[in-house]
Amino acid sequence: MKKPIIYLNHIRNQKEDVSALYFAKTEEISKRIHHHDWIKWSTEHKRFVVPTAQNTLGLLVDIFEDIAEINTQFYEANLVGNTEEVCIGDATYFNGILEKAKKCGSVTLTPLKNEFGRFLVVKYTYSKSIYQILVNCYHCTWNKEIRNFVIEPKVNALMGFINYVAPRLTVKMHNELNIRDCRILQLLYEQAYKKDHFYKSGSLDFLKYMQLKAYSESTISTYYYFVLRFINSYKRNTLEQIKLFNSEKINHYHQLMLGEKEYSTSSINQSVSAIKLFYNDFFKQNMQIDQIIRPKRGKTLPKVWSKEEVEKILISISNIKHKTLLALVYGSGMRIGEALKLKLADIDSKRMRIRVLGAKGKKDRYTLLAISQLTLLRDYYKEYKPNNYLFGGQLGGQYSATSAGNTLKAAIKRSHVPKRGGLHSLRHSFATHLLESGTDLRYIQELLGHESSKTTEIYTHVSNKYLSQIKSPLDDLII
């Protein structure tokens, strides 16, 4: 009769150097192990293990000689779960670019109007260090009626406050506080970074230029960051010298960025667009933009939930406001920013439509209002009585996108549905489910507000409707 085999596998790391025993359990092997206390059970590996030494193999052969065979075929094999991705040789070509400054906390400036006047209220979670900074700042004062520190809603007062506290505190703005002055925006965009001897502030005129071009706040912030990073990568060059860079120099910069592997292809493309705007449109350099090589973007498919999974997510939410918001994003396919900007007048219950104003690309459109969504909205209205934005925040203004994201995250966890992204995955799911139900791609494009049909066509790659109609050639074989 053939003896059972005990396979050995070598496990070596910083904590241990052992040989694990893999075998089909038999009564004889179990008894033999019981009589040799140097063979121990490992709860971590869920195997019997022995210390690795020169005589380990010989001892095991002697112990099991008459009942089992010791096999070392897989002694140095990598077992599933014991490997990890290791990247060797990551390069950093630009050291110390926009180093983050250490902060001891943050404050949020919130606009307030009451019988005593107009103020910017300094909201913060109390700590002795933050309180001391605010006490010593003469640009803000303690208001007895409001029982908080306040700032005059004037440009000079706000600039003075940011300049004083930003080295130690992060200054945030409530979404009802609309900052138009480029000098303040510049301070806010640059407050996160250390200002060493070589630090160069970005161009204030470039900020004004992007505002005049009517770029969105998000685009302005992103483009400003990438231009700021670019000019601070060349520490010993003045801004006047950087203005004279050619496309070869800029192309080389982005190649180095790509080599550092810190930024995604999408981010580097944003950097190319920002620097292209900086040179060609703002500086009027007439640079040969086709010489600036854009890295090829990988093709990634949107992650979607099934209808059943979306249902489980929504059912798990008990708060009517949270449920109404997430149901609206899925039921209409809106971006979260579009949903949070909605006002009561944008809900057209007679035509069962939702009006989306000033969407991406400054375009208005209509999208769907589901019957079940209308019922949710009516129940939500009765309880919350919104008077401006459909979904208001605790301090007024719009509801926070961060809070909405946290709501979805908690619902996914409660409903035990696989995590397939965040709020935007609800929009992806809306489009995919419409396509699977037979809706023409052109209508889906209009509902989503896509400028190009190519953007909408990506949903054909994730739709089960089309995949289920394709037959694998393996089905024609007899195997």
Image (cartoon, grey):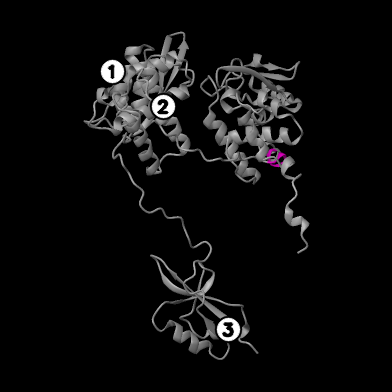
Badge 3 amino acid:
Ile
Any mark on residue 19, and which? none
Q: Do the residues labelled 3 and 2 touch (CB within 8 Å)?
A: no
For residue 259, what is the image quadrant? top left
Examine the rendered structure and indicate whether residue 447 appears above or below residue 120.
below
Residue on which the image places disc 1: 138
Marks 2 and 1, how far apart in space?
A: 49 Å
**Residue located beneath label 2 in the image:** 289
Q: In this view, does 406 lie to the left or right of 430?
A: left
Residue at horizontal 57%, vertical 22%? 392
Q: Is mark 1 on a helix, strand or loop?
A: loop
| Image location of residue 421, percent across then percent down | 58, 40
> 81 above or below 423?
below
What segment is highlighted magenta in the picture?
306-310
Q: How crowded is mark 1: few (under 14 residues within 10 Å), some or many (20 or more)?
A: few
User: Image quadrant for the N terminus?
Assistant: bottom right
Measure the C-alpha gap from mark 1 to mark 3.
81 Å
Judging by the rendered image, the residue that carries numbered circle 3 is 29
